[in-house]
Amino acid sequence: MQQTIAKEITVTGIGLHSGAAAELRLKPAAENTGIVFRRADIAESVPVKALYSNVVDTRNCTCLGDASGNVISTVEHLMAALAVMRIDNLLVEVTAPEMPIMDGAAAFFYDTLRQAGTTVQSSPRRQIKILKTVRFADDAGNYVMLEPADEFSIHFTIEFPSKIVGHQEFDSVITPEIFARQIAPCRTFCEKAQIDYLRSVGLIKGGSLDNAVVLDGETILNPGGFKVPNECVNHKVLDALGDMYTAGAPLIGRLTAVKTGHYHNNRLLKALFADDTNYEIV
Ligand SMILES: [Zn+2]
């Protein structure tokens, strides 16, 4: 059966790029609503469904938007928590063009949603069962692929020149226990040089060592180090989980990703839904 949250939640935080405070309200929604985002700071703004077809930017995060140019960016960490919590219907109101970054991961959202609890609704849940292998590769040969399988799993590989990251792999089914322990705490990561550049062009004003892992060559600048072993690849798994939930329903299949990101995830879903013999609704 479909689920929504048992009670409304309000939290405040700052946007990663703007550094501005934003309020986030999560409200229960009726069955068959799906996950819907709305800009609460714009009068009469149109709600935008969290669907791959409403993704308007994938450069640094997954950004939803509508025809009139309203955008809500960095939806993927909340979406991952919603996917694992099996929340089908929710209204997400945010008072800024970007979601508050909170812990830079999904642990805060996951804990907050668990505290609110879920309500079981009266319509059956729809799931998307993968019937054929669907693949998207970029010009460099990096690729993402969905294949038929009995349950949802992710195999993710990253390769970075610095030895502190190097070659990392994650390969597992996604259970709430695995998510809570190994994935939800994993923060966005970046190179210090990248940060210096982004700061110079007025971005990441809300970024800090509290919400991102910052690497400087072979050194991690965060005083506490990594939160979990392989935090970098596990954060990519977190992003992929959130992005795959923009399919509009949980997927039943195996996701394989090699050195890819939000752009590839979105292209993969577009390829999946371009041919209705690729999947069936169960
Ligand atoms: Zn992320």
Image: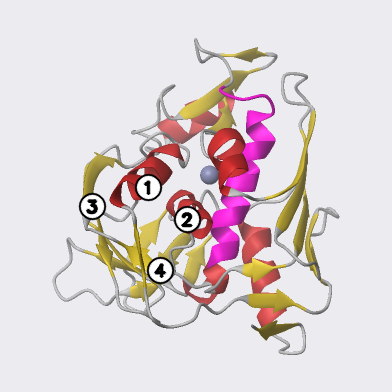
Examine the rendered structure and indicate whether residue 239 appears above or below residue 30: above
Q: Are marks 4 and 3 in contact (CB under 8 Å)?
A: no
Q: Which residue is drawn at 48% across and 38% down?
A: 105
Look at the image and tell me in which quarter the C terminus lies. Answer: bottom right
Residue in the foreground of this view, choosing between 146 and 177: 177
Mark before the other along the chain sequence, 2 or 3: 3
Looking at the rendered structure, the kind of residue marked 4 is Gln
Examine the rendered structure and indicate whether residue 161 appears above or below residue 180: above
Q: Nearer the viewer, mark 3 or mark 1?
A: 1
Q: Can residue 214 be spotted in the picture? A: yes
Q: Are marks 2 and 3 in contact (CB under 8 Å)?
A: no
Q: Which mark is residue 9?
A: 3
Q: Which of marks 2 and 3 is in front?
A: 2
Q: Does the magenta stretch include residue 238?
A: yes
Question: For the stretch drawn in magenta, what is the main secondary structure?
Answer: helix
Q: Which residue is drawn at 47% across and 49% down?
A: 77
Image position, residue 176 (x, y; %) = 56, 47
Q: Mark 4 points at which residue?
A: 3
Secondary structure of the residue carrying numbered label 3:
strand
Looking at the rendered structure, the kind of residue marked 3 is Ile
Q: Which residue is drawn at 38% across and 38% down?
A: 108
Residue numbers of the magenta segment: 227-245
Task: Give the CA separation, mark 2 to mark 3.
Answer: 15 Å
